[in-house]
Each structure stands twice: as C-alpha cells, then as structure tokens.
Image: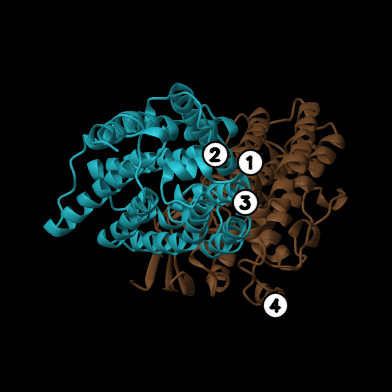
Chain colours: A brown, B cyan
C-alpha cells in the first residue's frame, strides 16, 4: 500500500478545497502536510483598487459563512480612522446580527461534524435548526448569506420587530438545550468518536497561537468580546465557555455552549435596544492614517489593518482570518490518530479556507 | 432435493424472481425510512431499480484486459454467490435441503465480502485498498460470532442440514444465536454504526470506489441481494413453526425480513459511525460473548 493518502483538494469530508497529505502506517497517521491556496481570489489586491463603499461589498464576500464579521471589522477600522461614534441603536443591531451569524456558523459546523462521523440524522437536525437562524437573518437583513448590514458609522437597516428576534433566539436556545446538546454529549457512538480524539494541550494551543473555540476548548480563556470589548459587549451579561480537555468533544461542547450564550446575548441586546438613529450619516470621509480592528468571529479573532492616504481608495487592506492561525494545529492534532479520525479532527477547528485564501 | 425443486428455489423463490425485486424494495425501504426519520421526503419506491438501469446503460471505462476481466467477474461472482445462498434458505423445510447445506450456505455468504476485498485491491485505488483492508479486518471480526452462532445451532439440532436446524434447535440456544446473528447484520450490510468499510467521509466508497457503470450496478445488486439473503436467513431461523401451511410460511418469512430491514435502518439512522478498531472490538467482545454463550448452552443443555 502506498504510504501517502491524500485527503483533498476534493474529498467528501471537506467543504472547501484544500489538501491534507497523510503519511500513514496502515490506519495510523504518522505525519500530515497541509496545502492551502486552491481558492485564492486576490481580495486584498482588489481592495486597494476600489473605493471604500465598493470595498465594503468586497470584504463581505471573503467568507460565505461569516460575511458579517468582515464588514463589521472593516467598518470598525474605518470608524477608528474617521473618529466616528456609532449610535447606540446601531451598536445593538450590530450585536444581534453578529451573534445570529455566530449561531448559524456554529450550527453549520455542528452539522458538518455530525456528517463526518457518519451521523446524518444529527446533521439534518442541526441544519433544520440552522434554517431558523437563517430565516431570522433574512427577516432582519433581507438576505440569507451576505447581509449587507454594516456600514462605517452604523447599520443599513433597522430591526422593525424586536419581539420576533427575541422569541426566535429563545426558541433556538430551547431546541439547542433539549435536542442537540444532549445527543452530542451523551450519545455513545458520538462519544466514542469524539472523546479523547485530536487532543491539543493548553501549552500547544498557546505555542501555536490557536484562536477562538479551538483555544477555549484547550483551556485558554481568550475571547475578544471579553478581552477588548467592542460595541456593547462590556454591558452584556454572558459567559465564555472554556473546557480544559482539548479534544474534539471539548470543541463541540464549547461551541454548543457558545450557541446558548449567543441566544442570551441576542435576547439582552434586543431587550435593551434604545430608540434613536441607526447611522452617523450617509457619508463618512476617511482621513489619512492607519487603523487596526479585531473582533471575535465565530472561528476566533478576525483582524483588519487599513491604511489610508485620505483618498477614497485605501492604501492597504490586510485581512487575517482565524483559520490561518488554527490551520497548523491540525497537523499537530492528527499525529498518532487513526485515518478515520482525520476528517473529524480537521473539521473540529471549523476551517474556513475561502477566508484563508482570501 | 430434486433438480426441479433446486431450480425452483434458485430461480423463483426465494431465488432470482423473488430476490431481485425484493432487493430493490429493501434498498428503497432503508433509504425511505432513513429519510423520513431525518425529516426528508426520500426517494420513490422504484428508485433503486432506476439507479440499476441507469448504471447498466453507462459505457464501462476502458481498462487493461486482466483488470477489466477481474473487475467484471468479481461483482458477477458476488451476485451468483448470494443467489446460491438464497436458494439454500429452508423457507419450506419439508421439501428441500440436504445434509451439509449449512456449510455451503456459510461458504456462499462469505463470497461477497471476499469479492469486495479482491475488488478493492484489483481496482488499484488507494481508497479501494483501504476499503478492502477494512472489509477484511471486519470480516475476521464478525466471522467469529457469526460462525459460532451457526455452529451452536447445528450442535443444538445435532445436524448440518439447514431445514433440520431451523425446526429443531432449542430456544435457549436459538435466542443468543439469533442475537449474535442480528449483531452481525449491520457490519455485513455495511450500515451504521458499522459502515466502516464504505465510510464515505473517510475513504469514498471503499472497495468499490473505482467501479463504474454496469460493474457498479452489479455491486449494487449484490448488495441488495445480501440484504435479502441475510435478513432471510435470520427470518427462517426465527420462525420455526413446522406445521404452518406454505403460504403462511412464505408470508411470515417476507414479513420478518422486511421488519428486520426497518429495524436495521432505524438503528443506522440513530447512530454515528464507529472506527475500525471500535467496531472490531464490539464483535470480538459482545459478538463472541453471545456466540460462545449459545455454544455453551448447546453443549451443556442437550
């Protein structure tokens, strides 16, 4: 048997094109090599050739799942440059959409995790619940994928029916606690596949710079929403779930608890939503200078650097997505595991290669 | 067993004429029930038949002569072996069978997995080879409980004839033996939680990854026939009423087979896929325990 087994660039377990080459000894993995860059789209290059309004639509298309994160971070960088204060109502709306996006991203990921361990019924359950989140996002923004909600200085659309948003968040929280979390944490076949698999210790997570749920499942309590609160996060009451085990099950539990927390955040943000304007004016001039912004996306810290010379076209837009940081840990985690675990372990970092190949 | 009787069993019931439509029916039932349990609609009942016809109509890939021969012969052999096994099932125990047909049945039932292992290696695909290796490891694991259960039944009935076994084995042996056989069904049929040899998200379709068109159609048919043969074997062993009239026997045989398909599909829909080592452990531990229990009871409780 040939010792190198290719997983990807096109493989049933992968959502997006990238490649893991496995040096195998029978079913045991000795070494893994990861190749990315199959989907490079030159978004940073394009961003330096378009004006800020066009760039907003451009960065929204970096990712098909966490599109809102990109416009939010980009808008925050521009607001920092322009010194604009975002109205309170807009901040609440931003948090609602931001957390709803985290909900649908985590539910999508939970479905994929179920799929790669061959549990298609659980996949269907997760995606049925995710559909409720998508309906919520569509009701709020008019769109299912690229919401076009953020702009420098505020948001583009008001939430006209806050009661519906809160009720949906509550319904999702109930369904999550009753249907999905029990299956993931107590089902024997799921536990057999996830517990003790793909362990990333706290020290390794720290040394390799893991971010987001991957770091939190390895016992690192890091979350930008707590560490450097933006929008209204400093005024909200929520927990950051942390697990010390560092295995795939811990990553599942962390994300599942984050879904519950996100629902609570949405309920609070809707409850305390003040009246008032939803933006700081139609046009925000961007002066010369440079700014960084970072927020906690569903997969971890999203970082933007924007440099401006005062014209309407940025000098430089630099995007760093969390998968870029988390991806190398996969090679660490799959070592000495079996071939059957590789699809699950690579999925457990919630990889987003279209973001990485921006 | 007369020649006419043998031909009837091979070609009509429970052989070709019965088994092929029921194979498609069982494949459909499995897909449909899974879909309904998952909140989907599922395919219409003729879908497996259409799949078969569509695959048959495709032009096979040109391959080197020996490989083409092997890749065509192996699924044919798997279909033939399963049909032969089906013909031996003692649905009407008074009018068929011969001493030692149990041994032949066991041998014929082992042909499809063996062909699958060979097919995986012959196709020269890394995923086919991995699937074949998994299939081989699993067949070693499940053979112990499977054979132990059948040997226990034979010992209990003091005969190697299937019809005698199906009538005369005592229930204290029959029960653990049936449980052991039921435990072996999901892995032999490659459904969850033991769908290890064809784990799509890991190794595509496993041994049959490189098969296409008519060759794949034959594999699908062999797979469907395996459903009929294995659930049928379980059904004849689970319904020993010797005095029942033949229409009743036939109806009960079909009913138990189809009910078993539904149970297996429901279990498959409610579980994740285990890993190779975990699946093998289930058979070495729990399967063997049941098989050994049946054997011990058969020996010490005559």
SS at mark 4 in the image:
helix
Kindly indicate whether the residue at mark 4 contacts the one at mark 1 (C-beta within 8 angstroms): no
Q: Give the chain of mark 4.
A: A
Residue closest to the far left: B65
Marker disc for residue A203: 4
Q: Specify whether residue B161 is in view.
A: yes
Residue wearing tag 3: A74
Check the picture and name the quadrant holding the N terminus of chain A: bottom left
Residue B118 left/right relative to B40: left
Residue B79 left/right relative to A63: left
Spatial CA distance of label 2 from label 4 is: 57 Å
Q: Give the chain of mark 1.
A: A
Do discs 1 and 2 belong to a common subunit?
A: no
Residue wearing tag 1: A126
Residue under the point 52% across and 43% down: B168
Q: Specify whether residue A291 is in view.
A: no
| Residue sitting nearer the eye, A288 or B238 | B238
Residue B138, image x and y in percent?
A: 46, 60
Do discs 1 and 4 belong to a common subunit?
A: yes
Of callouts 1 and 4, the N-terminal one = 1
Spatial CA distance of label 1 from label 4 is: 32 Å
Of callouts 1 and 3, the N-terminal one = 3
- Which of label 1 and label 2 is nearer to you? 2
Within 10 Å of disc 3 (Cα), the crowding (few <14, some 14-19, many 20+) is many
Residue wearing tag 2: B238
- Which of label 1 and label 3 is nearer to you? 1
Residue B107, image x and y in percent?
A: 35, 54
């Amino acid at each position: 048997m040939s010792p190198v087994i290719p997983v990807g660039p096109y493989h049933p377990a992968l959502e997006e094109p990238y490649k893991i080459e496995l040096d195998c000894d029978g079913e045991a993995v000795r070494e893994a090599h990861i190749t990315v860059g199959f989907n490079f789209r030159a978004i940073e290059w394009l961003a330096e050739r378009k004006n800020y309004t066009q760039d907003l639509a451009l960065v929204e298309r970096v990712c098909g799942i966490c599109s809102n994160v990109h416009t939010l971070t980009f808008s925050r960088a521009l607001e920092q440059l322009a010194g604009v204060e975002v109205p309170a109502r807009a901040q609440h709306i931003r948090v609602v959409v931001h957390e709803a996006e985290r909900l649908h991203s985590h539910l999508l990921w939970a479905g994929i995790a179920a799929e790669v361990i061959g549990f298609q019924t659980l996949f269907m359950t997760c995606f049925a619940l995710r559909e409720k989140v998508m309906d919520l996002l569509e009701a709020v923004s008019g769109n299912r994928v690229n919401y076009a909600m953020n702009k420098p200085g505020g948001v583009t659309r008001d939430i006209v029916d806050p009661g519906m948003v809160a009720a949906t968040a509550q319904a999702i929280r109930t369904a999550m606690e009753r249907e999905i979390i029990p299956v993931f944490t107590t089902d024997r076949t799921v536990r057999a596949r996830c517990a003790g698999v793909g362990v990333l210790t706290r020290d390794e997570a720290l040394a390799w710079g893991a971010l987001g749920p991957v770091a939190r499942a390895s016992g690192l309590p890091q979350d930008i929403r707590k560490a450097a609160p933006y929008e209204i996060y400093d005024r909200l009451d929520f927990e950051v779930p942390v697990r010390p085990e560092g295995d795939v099950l811990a990553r599942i539990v962390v994300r599942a608890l984050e879904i519950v927390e996100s629902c609570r955040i949405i309920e609070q943000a809707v409850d305390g939503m003040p009246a008032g304007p939803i933006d700081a004016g139609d046009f925000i001039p961007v002066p010369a200078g440079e700014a960084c912004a970072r927020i906690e996306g569903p997969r971890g810290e999203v970082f933007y650097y924007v440099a401006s010379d005062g014209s309407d076209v940025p000098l430089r837009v630099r995007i760093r997505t969390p998968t870029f940081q988390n991806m190398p840990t996969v090679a660490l985690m799959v070592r000495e595991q079996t071939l059957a675990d590789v699809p699950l372990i690579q999925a457990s970092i919630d990889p987003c290669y279209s973001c990485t190949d921006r | 067993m007369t020649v006419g009787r043998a031909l009837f069993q091979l070609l009509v019931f429970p052989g070709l004429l019965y088994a092929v439509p029921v194979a498609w029916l069982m494949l459909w039932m499995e897909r449909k029930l899974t879909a309904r349990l998952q909140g989907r609609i599922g395919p219409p009942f003729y879908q497996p038949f259409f799949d078969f016809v569509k695959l048959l109509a495709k032009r096979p890939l040109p391959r080197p002569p020996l490989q083409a021969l092997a890749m065509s012969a192996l699924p044919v052999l798997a279909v033939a072996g399963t049909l032969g096994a089906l013909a031996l099932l003692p649905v009407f125990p008074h009018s068929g069978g011969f001493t030692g047909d149990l041994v032949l049945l066991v041998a014929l039932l082992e042909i499809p997995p063996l062909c699958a292992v060979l097919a995986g290696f012959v196709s020269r695909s890394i995923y086919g080879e991995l699937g074949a290796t998994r299939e081989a490891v699993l067949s070693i694991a499940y053979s112990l409980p499977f054979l132990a259960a059948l040997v226990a039944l034979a010992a209990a009935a003091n005969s190697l004839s299937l019809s005698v076994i199906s009538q005369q084995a005592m229930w204290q042996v029959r029960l653990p033996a049936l449980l052991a056989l039921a435990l072996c069904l999901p892995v032999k049929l490659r459904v969850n939680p033991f769908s290890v040899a064809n784990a799509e998200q890991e190794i595509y379709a496993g041994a049959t990854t490189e098969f296409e068109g008519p060759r794949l159609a034959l594999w699908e048919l062999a797979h469907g026939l395996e459903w009929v043969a294995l659930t049928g074997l379980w059904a004849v062993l689970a319904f020993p009423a010797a005095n029942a009239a033949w229409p009743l026997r036939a109806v009960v045989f079909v009913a138990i087979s189809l009910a078993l398909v539904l149970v297996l599909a429901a279990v498959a829909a409610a579980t994740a896929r285990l890993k190779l080592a975990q699946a093998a452990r289930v058979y070495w531990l729990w399967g063997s325990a049941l098989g050994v229990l049946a054997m011990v009871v058969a020996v010490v409780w005559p």
